[in-house]
Image: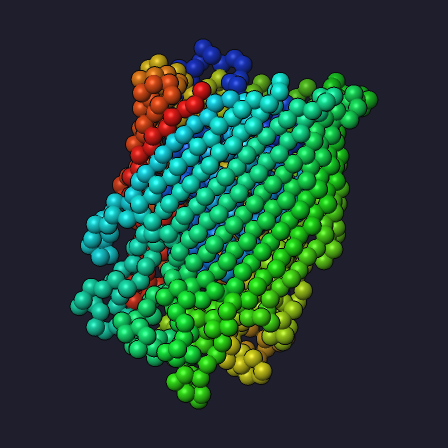
Amino acid sequence: MSGPRPRAVRVPTPLAALIAPGAALALAAAPAAAQEAGAPAPATIIVTGTHAKDRTELSSSAPVDIVSAEDLRAAAGPEANLGDALQALLPSVNYLDQSNSGSADHVRALQLRGLDPDQVLVLINGKRVHTTSVVNVESTVGLGSVAVDFASIPVNAVKRIEVLRDGAGAQYGSDAIAGVINIILDDARSGGEISVDAGLYHTHFAPTGRTIDDGQTQNLQGKYALPLGDDGYLNFGVDATHHEPTNRAGFDQLNPAYPARDLVTFRVGDAQIKNLNLWENMSLPLADGASGYSTILFNRRTSNGDAYFREPNDAVDNIASVYPGGFRPQSSGINQDWHASGGVRGALTDVFRYDTSLTYGLNTFTYGLADSLNASLGPASPTAFDLGGFRFGQATLNYDVTGDVGGFGLASPLTLALGGEVRRETYSTTPGVPASYEAGNYPSAANPAAPGSQGDGGLVPADVADLSRTVGGLYADLSGNLTRTVFADAALRFDHYSDAGSATTGKLSARWEFAPHWGLRGSISNNFRAPALAQIGGAYSPTTYVAAASPGTLALGSVQIVPVSNPAAVALGAQPLKPERSTNYSVGLTAQPVQPLQLSADLFRIDIRDRIALSQQVSPTSGPYAGGNYEFFTNAVDTATQGADLVGSWSSPLFGGNLVLSDASTWVDTGIRDIHAPPPQLAGVPANGYGGGLLFGLQAQNAITSALPRHRDVLTVNWSGAGKANTWNLLARTIYSGQVTRVFDFGNGGGVVSQTYNATVQLNLEAEYRATRELALALGADNVSDRYPTLSSAGINYYGNLPYDYLSPIGFNGRYYYVRLRYELR
């Protein structure tokens, strides 16, 4: 039996409408550039998604974005965060601020093309990057995903980033459903840079009528390069940030006495963050033309977020003698991350070259609480808790061979790539202290207060995990020009997981240059994603909305997120997780009608089967698990994601410098094709509870369909004085984000509440003055017009405490001013 009938999934915008903005750019460029309409402008040779040695972003058979180090510098935001920079520069990326979201306050998740964060593969110098060790279980954005932590990758280490917006499982293996983000590190042989940034939020906050100055931030970056031998190098650096918290909570109206006193009891905003990155990137010449290489990235981040305020008159959650004025638990995270890769590359024969490498990634996360209590333990309860620890390790051994082969009757040789990979993954957790999960009998055994620490509960010893698996893969890739105007690429890969079975994936892509500097491209592929070990064996006890005691009321309570093998999950119908599988289609047009102008338009569709999701809350009213609120992972749904990308840029000399205009737009729409039949064990769950007989309910559907903007656009105007002394670099960027919708199902007769938040436009400005060739001073502002999202309705703002939702990519902090001093070491 299938679930609800699939709704139609439409292509959001016809191709003609997509090309219209690019045509306007072309008309604007033509008068200045008609005399130069000859050879194409210089372009970067890409290394992502192809083994051919002559592909650029316009001549590739699949869409690739290239982001330079200069682009990242002005877009990294208050936290100097690589994810913030990518969201500001690429409309296909979402990387939203979180608040009051447990571990999601400390580890944010990046999405590509509206898909889940763990459906995009991240590489550093072409080597697979490990994910974090924590699952995102308390945020609508990327709910249930296990993401790569972009805050652990220093911005100043990056030379450029290549973002492949196409499925690439046949080339890279699991996770590359939405695409691939390849972060290529600095390989300079001399020189360096030191920069100091400082800034703060200065904003008028309408819900309280106050002007707020907070979020004070300092960032120090430094790097240096040394030559090694004839063509080797050693780059190393540091990136350190201290970011104070922000607060955008409204007046608390939950307690009848509060409105007249205009009290702000909640904290809604950025966590306090101390972030340290150390890194090196090295290549060393060896004998016989070979070279050894290594990359090491180390991150340590401590952060402090906030949970919901507990009212002084709350007899269930609070003890008046401990917190007579109420209390607001503060979550803490200690995140430690290593990425280390080393290898040797050189000539295998006269035709083929080899690359052998070993990469190891490790993430540990320690989760804690302060200013909290376990009310069921009474006045003797501790107020600080260790909630448990999480650890994920990944060791990857690669051997790759590439070379040009002929004999196919073609005008030029083809590039053949062959390779193998062996990967070992481990995941383990440690329990919290007993007081973080114990159930006491205060004030009485017959009517105890809430058990476990307030904010989030600690990890119970029975739910501790210790899992591992081995993955082996083989691939072959053949690419090249079939004719002078037709380029094609074919890839085939086989992977075997010791716990998730085998998968064979393939990809065909091609580009036809039907006229000089005009091309049609397209691809078709199948891809897969194996369930993360943290999704298979992880357990959490977050505090969130639960089924209210009476209809129409909101309540906070503990939810037990349990592994599919847990007896409670099995009793409620949980099944072993299967890999997600997708089929990807893409077709596009590239053009360079005049030398300064580049255009590309791509349509895509991604069909995903057996998508892994966190279930709806299931609250049985009878049986051995009655009275509890449970969630677990399930292959609950099939989806179809359709969309279009349009990218255009124009550059021209102007006033002794260079003017660059660029515009990028993404339209994306995810629809549900099928919700899988609920297990028979849920037949007894009442329809007015959270489960309602479904494992994939309204809130889960909202998280993947309408909680992300269907349209985003980034328009940038940049004039640069070309690095000369006494010149300026002037930047203006507008970021348009379409409307989003939030849905809450409060269960138990509490009803469904939804709200659509309007589209937003954010303006960022920066002016940098280069006093000498080495020294530059920049002044800038993000969100210059101090824009905020739509105010949340009374049904969602939790009694006025949460006036704005974090779903809007414009954020909820307002205007940010900053200054940056940069000195180049030559």
Question: How did the renderer colour the structure?
Answer: rainbow
Instruction: Say if 779 sits above or below 205 in the image.
Output: above
Residue 463 seen from this side: yes
Asked if residue 593 lies left or right of residue 351, the reply is left
Asked if residue 229 lies left or right of residue 731, the reply is right
Quadrant in which residue 105 is drawn: bottom left
Quadrant in which residue 805 is drawn: bottom left
Identified at 45% across, 43% down, the residue is 276
Q: Nearer the viewer, residue 731 or 776?
A: 776
Instruction: Say if 473 sits above or below 314 in the image.
Output: above
Asked if residue 545 lies left or right of residue 477, the reply is left
Instruction: Say if 826 sits above or below 811 in the image.
Output: above
Q: Residue furthest right?
A: 407
User: Where's the N terminus, which quadrant?
Assistant: bottom right
What x and y, as percent, mark residue 694?
A: 55, 69
Q: Nearer the viewer, residue 92 or 604?
A: 92
Q: Residue furthest left?
A: 260
Instruction: Say if 771 sits above or below 313 in the image.
Output: above
Identified at 33% across, 22% down, the residue is 770
Q: Nearer the viewer, residue 285 or 700?
A: 285
